[in-house]
Image (cartoon, grey):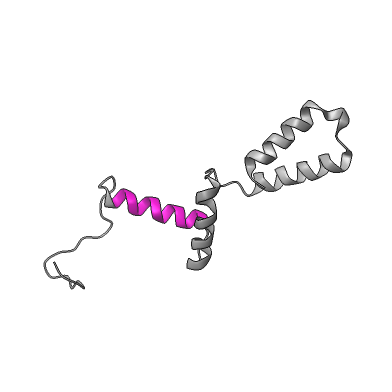
Amino acid sequence: MSRMTIASDLEAAADQIAEVSRADLQIMLRRAALMLRNVTGLVLDPNVEEPLASLAAKMGMSKAELVRTIVGDWLVANAYLPVPYAVDDESAVDGHA
């Protein structure tokens, strides 16, 4: 269940509080608490969220770590951040120049 769905359910329950059963309200509040506890501060489209979670699991890292790595690498590759290491003339490198 996505955050937007949970938020919509909570808003609907708030609009019709007298008609919502105690059990349904308890379930919604527990889901909301779980989402707040696990919030990462970044809401992604479900089409991006699922492959990202799969890739993170495959790489043995959290989604947050993977997103930090991807964004950091993109910023370096596009010259928004300096290269974190320097290669001088005496450094051994693999591949071709």
Q: Main secondary structure of the magenta part?
A: helix
Where residue 36 appears, as percent x and y from the top left, is: 65, 44
Based on the picture, tell me whether residue 74 belongs to the magenta stretch.
yes
Picture residue at 77% right of the left edge, 42% below the top: 28
In the picture, residue 24 is in which quadrant?
top right
- Left/right of residue 6 with respect to residue 80 in the rendered view: right
Q: Is residue 47 above or below residue 18?
A: below
Picture residue at 26% right of the left edge, 50% below the top: 82
Where residue 13 appears, as percent x and y from the top left, is: 78, 32
In the picture, residue 91 is in which quadrant?
bottom left
- Left/right of residue 90 with respect to residue 22 in the rendered view: left
> Which quadrant is home to the C terminus?
bottom left
Residue farthest left in this picture:
89
Q: How many marks?
A: 0
Where residue 84 appears, as percent x and y from the top left, is: 28, 57
Where residue 69 appears, as percent x and y from the top left, is: 40, 56
Q: Is residue 72 above or below residue 61?
A: above
Instruction: Using the image as rendered, state which of residue 4 and residue 37 is in the foreground.
Output: 4
Picture residue at 19% right of the left edge, 72% below the top: 95
Magenta extent:
63-76
Picture residue at 77% right of the left edge, 29% below the top: 14
Residue farthest top in this picture:
15
- Left/right of residue 4 with respect to residue 76 in the rendered view: right
